[in-house]
Amino acid sequence: MQKKTGSDPTKQGDDFASQIRGAEVSISRVKEAQIKAEAAKKPHFKWRNIIYTALIFASFLTIYRNLPEFLAISFTQKPLRAGSYVTDDKTDLCLSNLWAVAAAMRSGVKAPVRVCPASGAPYVVTKNSVFCPNPGLHGAAKLYADKKNVIPFLE
C-alpha cells in the first residue's frame, strides 16, 4: 500500500485543467455579454438608411416638380413696371431705358439721351416725366416714368 503524502498528481492535472476550462468559459461569457451590449447600443442601421433614402427621394421630387418655376424665375427677368408683363424684348428695353432716365431725373443728374428701341426716336423728357415717343409700337397707349413714382407705367 502506498501512503498518501498529499494529493494525487493525476487529480492535480485534472483540477488545473478544469480551472482553465472554467476561466475560458467565463471569459467567453464576458466577451459575449460585451458584444451583445455593443450591438444593443448601435441604432438600427436599416431604418436610418430607409429614412435617408426617403428624404433624398422627396428632395429630388420637389426639385423636379418645381424646375419650371426655377427656370422661369432665373432666366426671364423683365424690368419692373406698373401694367402688363406680357411684352416683347423691345418693350422691356424701352422700360429699362425709362428706369435709367427717371433715376437720373430723381437724383438731379442730367438725364442721358436715350432713344426708343422700337422707333429710334429720343424719349420726350419734361420737367417731371419721361415718355416713350411711340408707345403704340409697343402695344400700349402710354409708356412713361416720372419723378414721383419709382416704377415706370405701361398703359
Image (tube, helix red, strand yellow):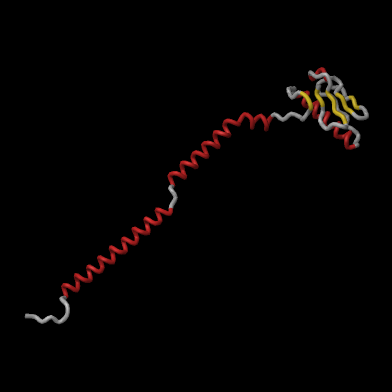
In the picture, which quadrant includes the N terminus?
bottom left
Q: Is residue 39 left or right of residue 138?
A: left
**Among the 4 quarters of the image, the one containing residue 22:** bottom left
Residue projecting furthest to the left: 1
**Residue occupying image coordinates x 32% and y 64%:** 27
Q: Position of residue 109 (x, y in %)?
A: 90, 36
**Among the 4 quarters of the image, the one containing residue 94:** top right
**Residue occupying image coordinates x 87% and y 32%:** 148
Is 62 placed above or below 52 here?
above
> Exactly how many numbered labels are in the figure?
0
Is 113 placed above or below 2 here?
above
**Among the 4 quarters of the image, the one containing residue 119:** top right
Q: Position of residue 70 (x, y in %)?
A: 64, 32
Residue projecting furthest to the right: 127
In the picture, which quadrant includes the C terminus?
top right
35 vs 135, nearest the viewer: 35
68 vs 54, nearest the viewer: 54
Q: Position of residue 9 (x, y in %)?
A: 16, 75
Is 53 placed above or below 141 here?
below
**Residue occupying image coordinates x 93% and y 29%:** 127
Q: Position of residue 87 (x, y in %)?
A: 75, 22
Q: Is residue 24 left or right of residue 9?
A: right
**Residue occupying image coordinates x 51% and y 36%:** 57
Q: Is residue 63 left or right of residue 28?
A: right
